[in-house]
Amino acid sequence: MPRSSRSAPRAPAPDPRFVEQPSLFGDDTQPKQPPQQPPLGAAAANATTQPKTSQPNTATSLLVQAPGQRQRSAAGQAFERERARIERLRQQLQTLEADGQAHRTRCAQLLGPLRQQQKQLRRAMVLALDPWLEGKPKGLSANQLDTLRQIVCAQSESLALEGEADMAALHDRRSPQTLAERQLEQAKAIHQDLQQGLGDALETELPEFDPDNPSAALHAALEHLQQQFKQQRDEQEQLAQQKAAKRAAKQARRKPSAAAEMAAAHLADADATLRLLYRQLASALHPDRAADAADQAHKHTLMSAVNAAYANRDLVALLELQWRAELVDPDHLERVGDERLRSLTLLLKQQAAALERDRQACQWRLAEEFDLLPHEVCNLASLRRALQDNLDDLQDELELMQHDLEQVQALATLKPWLTEQRRLLRAAEREQQQRRAFASLDDLDPWG
């Protein structure tokens, strides 16, 4: 019987870019010897006469199916789910950061002019109230004069701390204490609080307070406390390491469970894969292998990204860089075995957990910066709502300040205004005393 003139179909030629580069993971699902393909006619006959007894080998089917038709194993599906989760978390984090920056710009554009107007009204109020303290003003009681002086001194001090030099001179002229004396007194109080609140707890004595240089004294006290904190933290970490070593030694004497052995094996394999990826990328991107200056700059950029990805244990980034460096074909993960995929999936889960923590931290940071309500999720809608609330509150405050400024121009309206301000000051002082009392109760030890 004559042989058929039609030969068996030949496999497509491999991409020449990838011929000399082995897979970084190894084709551990691929058979060592490719199966011989029967003649096309025989294959067709077998397909019609022989019963289907088993499913085809997954690795073999992956190699012959088109990319859109490949059937993934459970391990491959888990790997892709984690990779998609990482991409989703990255997009969410990038969106949050971009929304935060855009909202920060909007706040500066909309709130900035209103806050500048608020500062101008504060300054105008001080300049309107100060003349009433000249000489012996008629028609104002001692309590009203005392309230007037308190307001002038408080507002001028606040403006002086914001850089208004003439307000500092006005404060010193009206206050029984100059700003320098007040700052010295406040620095002493802070130094004393640091000693009582932190120094005593750490069983350490702060450097003595220098009244001639209060700022340097506070810096020295804070630096001393930081050193003590670091020493205490180092001692605690050393103790924790000793306890962990004892626990590890105790566990080592026990026979690990099969699940524990499997988890340890996957973790070790994942770490080894990261190191292998890094070493091969570093070798391929070595500047000595660059063809010219442009190629050298390109390799340097890629290597910087490789270093950052390896430091962050970012498997997804390393895989992308591996493809960008043309070390593998885009479909090389299709030929990775299930055990290796499970190890890589473990790395992806760790990376996804770290991204989730970063996303939560970004949300909390933005919520605190832009005064979101405790239950609100940080998004464009909640940021716009918070901005509108701030705009409304600031606009209401400006209208009230403008009304107050009109009230202090004449004695007839100044007197009732000062009486009302004195009442508000006393109410604020009582509230502050109550807060201090509650704070003192919180510090009490009921079992002491």
Image (tube, rainbow, N blue to C red):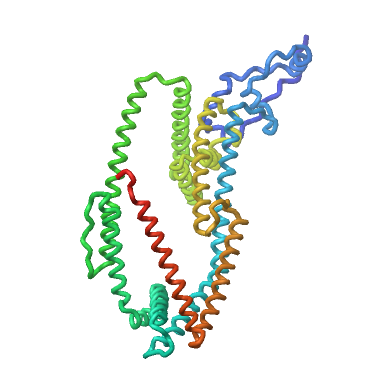
In the foreground, 189 or 299: 189
Q: Residue at x 53, y 28 (%)?
A: 342
Q: Position of residue 393 (x, y in %)?
A: 56, 68
Give the side of residue 144 with respect to residue 400, left or right: left
Give the side of residue 231 with respect to residue 296, left or right: left
Inspect this view and state whether residue 256 appears.
yes
Q: Residue at x 34, y 83 (%)?
A: 173
The answer to whether residue 163 is above or below residue 434 is below
Q: Residue at x 37, y 58 (%)?
A: 437
- Position of the N terminus, as image quadrant, is top right
In the foreground, 214 or 445: 445
Q: Position of residue 390 (x, y in %)?
A: 56, 65
The answer to whether residue 191 is above or below residue 179 is above
Give the side of residue 137 with respect to residue 81, left or right: left
Q: Position of residue 100 (x, y in %)?
A: 55, 57
- Position of the C terminus, as image quadrant, is top left
The answer to whether residue 270 is above or below residue 129 is above
Which quadrant of the view contains residue 161?
Answer: bottom left
The answer to whether residue 133 is above or below residue 359 is below
Q: Residue at x 43, y 71 (%)?
A: 425
Q: Position of residue 217 (x, y in %)?
A: 25, 63
